[in-house]
Image (spheres, rainbow, N blue to C red):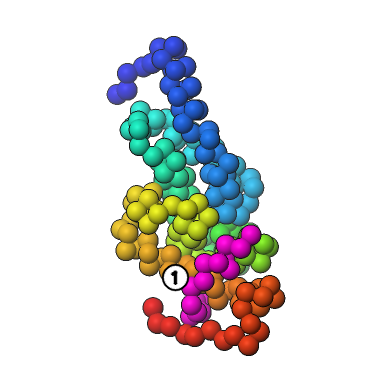
Amino acid sequence: MKQQQIPSQLATTKQEFEALTLPHMDELYATALRLTRREKDAEDLVQDTYLKAFKHFDQFERGTNCRAWMFRILTNTFINAYRRRVKEREILDKQQSGQLANFFFSKEDAERDADPVQAIAMSGLSDDVKKALDEIPTDFRVVVVLSDLQDFSYKEIAEIMDTPIGTVMSRLFRGRRLLRSRLEEYARREGFISPEFMPVSVGI
C-alpha cells in the first residue's frame, strides 16, 4: 500500500512530473494521432497516458529516459485498447454481421512484396502517405511510427514495446515493405521512382 502524500509533497511531485513529461506532449499526441487516426481518440489516448504515468510516477527511475518511458505507456495503452476492440469486434461479428463499418481500426490488407523504402514513407506525410500508413496492420504501424517518425532506436523500441530486438527489426522491415507497396503510385507521381519501375518480389 502506498504511503499517502501530504499536500506539499504532492505539489512537489506534480511539479517534477510536469517538468519531465510535458515537453513530450506534442510528439506523444502526434504519435497517438498516427496510431488511432482520430483526433478525439488521440486526445483520449494521450490523456490516459498522462494519468497512468502520474499514477505510477513513483516507479519511474530518475535520470533514465523519460521520453521512452512515456512512449512505452502510450504504446501499451494503445495496444491494450486495440486488443479489447478486436475481441469486441469478434463478438459483434457473430451477433451482427456487417455492423462494424466504423470500427476503430482497419482490417489487415493482403501483403504485397516490394523493397522497403523509408524515404518515400517519411517524405512530409502527405495525405497519400498518411492513408498508406493507416492501412498497415497495427503491429507494423506502431514500429514504423516509433522508428521513422519518432527516431527511436531498435533497442529503445524493444524496451518500449517489451519485445525482442529481432522482432522489432522484422516488423519494421515488413511495415516499410507494406508502405512501399502502397506508395508506388504516389512515388511515381512525385518523381521518387521512374514510371517504368516495377517492384521485385522478395520472400519473407
For the stretch drawn in magenta, the main secondary structure is: loop
Judged left or right of residue 163, residue 195 is: right
Total number of numbered discs in the rendering = 1
Q: Residues within 10 Å of mark 1 (few under 14, many from 20)?
A: many
Q: Which residues are magenta?
A: 109-124
Q: In the rendered structure, does residue 22 fall within the stretch colored magenta? A: no
Judged left or right of residue 94, residue 197 is: right
For the residue marked with disc 1, what is the amino acid?
Arg
Image height of 107 relative to 181, above or below: above
Q: Is residue 73 visible?
A: no
Judged left or right of residue 3, residue 125 is: right
Looking at the rendered image, the quarter that the N terminus falls into is top left
- What is the quadrant of residue 195 in the picture? bottom right
Task: Residue at 58%, 41% (x, y): give it.
Answer: 26
Task: Residue at 39%, 30% (x, y): give it.
Answer: 57
- What is the quadrant of residue 95 in the picture? bottom right
Image height of 160 relative to 183, above or below: above
Name the spot of residue 35 as percent of width and height, x first: 54, 54
